Image (cartoon, helix red, strand yellow):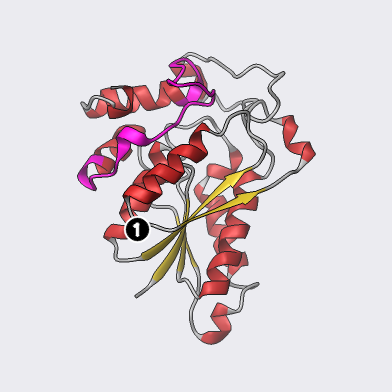
Amino acid sequence: MKKAVVLFSGGLDSTTCLAWALKKGYKCFALSFFYGQRHDRENKAAKKIAKIMKVPLFNVSLFLPWLKESSLVDKSKKIPENKPEKIASGKIPSTYVPGRNLMFASIGVSFADAIGAEAVVLGPNAVDYSGYPDCRPEFYKALNTAVNLGTKNPSMGRKIKILTPIINMSKAEIVKLAFKLNAPLKYTWSCYKGGKKPCGVCDSCLLRAAGFEKAGYKDPALD
């Protein structure tokens, strides 16, 4: 059975990608990260969802002090609360974590290389997003080339594919796909802030809310 490592935060996007990979017939290994972010709510969501979807979950902890450049890590910095039309203005917000997707993807590739997996599945999105440079399609195209120059699998006749199934989808399209795949959205967490309930005002909450509204679905995580 073909294998895939799925980078998994427990949010809407990564949960949709995990459901997609399972539907495609991959034996999935979920990989989540704690990198000093201001709350562990998303990691708790990842653990619960992985259990529901019967996928083994591996958690990696990274303690890198320079990541406090991001307001997602440094609690003394304010989380942006932009109007929806300003979220994708082209200006990189303070929530950007330096090199985060590159680090996570590299660790995912290391895992895939070790277990002989054919794919690393990630959930970046370059349509309704906050303008992070490591969410763009050209980044993953270049990364895929680098991966197959620096891993053992190609020499064995098997390449590792970097798969980004929702990268060109709107948030509404992602929501529709999630419902089509019966992803357990009730347990997902997208909010940049901690707490028992999503704040409803951070960029991630606003993008998610707009996606559900445009898709014509009620967000089950808000019940």
Question: Circle 1 is placed at which residue position?
Answer: 21
Number of marks drawn: 1
Mark 1: amino acid = Ala
Classify residue 176 by image quadrant: top left
Between 126 and 202, the residue placed more toward the observer is: 202
* Residue 44, x across and y down, in percent: 48, 38
Q: Secondary structure at mark 1?
A: helix
Residue range highlighted in magenta: 179-204
* Side (left or right) of 73 relative to 41: right
Residue 166 is at least partly visible in this image = no
Classify residue 127 by image quadrant: top left
Residue 176 is at least partly visible in this image = yes
Q: Count residues near mark 1 (Cα–Cα under 10 Å), then give few for <14, some for 14-19, many for 20+.
A: many
* Side (left or right) of 132 relative to 44: right
* Residue 21, x across and y down, in percent: 35, 58
Q: Is residue 20 above or below residue 127?
A: below
Classify residue 97 by image quadrant: top right
Which residue is rendered at x = 73% and y = 37% of the image?
Answer: 67
Between 211 and 57, the residue placed more toward the observer is: 57
* Side (left or right) of 163 relative to 174: right
Between 44 and 155, the residue placed more toward the observer is: 44
Which residue is rendered at x = 69% and y = 40% of the image?
Answer: 98
Q: Is residue 191 above or below residue 132?
A: above
